[in-house]
Amino acid sequence: MTAASAIDYESIFLHAPVGMCISAHRTIQASNDALAQMFGYTRVAMNGMSFQQLYPTMDEFLRTGDRIIPIMNAKGRYSDERIMRRASGELFWCHVTGHAMRAAEPLGPGIWTFEDVSEKRPVTAELTPREREIAALLVEGKTSKAIGRQIDLSPRTVEMHRAKLMRKFAAATSSELVHKLVGLQQL
């Protein structure tokens, strides 16, 4: 390959159509244009920023980190959909995928992608941090028992939160709730 035809990986990273960053210990080391635009920051402002600033609350940041570690340890990668926060304070649904660059350090150096899915799934109701967490797990198809095990709550407590979500989204059934959470219309 000649110098003229060499692939410019930095340009590909900077101009990729999906938000991307390289992180270490939950701090952004380098970000691309799409990520900065999605969250409403400049790339320069995002570099060195803790992921904590992109979460609605500190508690959600901490709980997500706790949830990521065992999955990254087992698989080396992690993926979910969660509610994130823009610089303006606006909340939005985001699909997040990460890959650890060192198997022994799940939150060490890593590559993360972010996709704004708010057009398909708008944030339409005021939710507590715990309700946001449970809503994200319901969307993944998890049962109350599985959610309870994953976030260290009793299945009954999860059911209580599910019932509150059903009231907030005016859903008559759990299936209807999930459809509303993913932005689908019930036929």
Image (cartoon, rainbow, N blue to C red):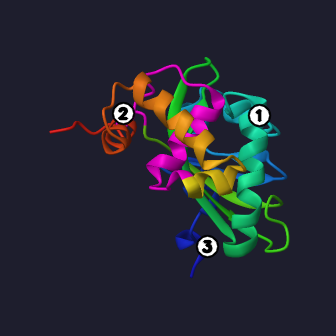
Q: Residue at x 32, y 41 (%)?
A: 179
State the residue in front, 67 or 134. Answer: 134
Q: Is residue 169 left or right of residue 31?
A: left
Single out the residue that lies furthest toward the front.
156
Give the side of residue 86 with respect to residue 166, left or right.
right
Which SS class for mark 1? helix
Q: Residue 76's mark? A: none
Whole-angstrom CA distance, mark 3 to mark 1, is 49 Å
Residue 84 locus on image (x, y percent): 60, 34
SS state under label 2: loop
Residue 41, quarter of picture: top right
**Residue 175 seen in the current view:** yes
Residue at the spot of label 2: 119
Taking the view exactly as shown, the residue that stands out farthest to the left is 187
- Image quadrant occupied by the C terminus: top left
Give the foreground label among 1 and 2. 1
Residue underneath mark 3: 3
Which amino acid, by three-letter code, is at mark 3? Ala
The first of marks 3 and 1 along the sequence is 3
- Extent of the magenta region: 118-144
Is 162 placed above or below 145 here? above
Residue ID at (71%, 46%): 64
Q: Nearer the viewer, residue 51 or 137?
A: 137
122 versus 69 height, above or below: above
Three-letter code, disc 2: Glu
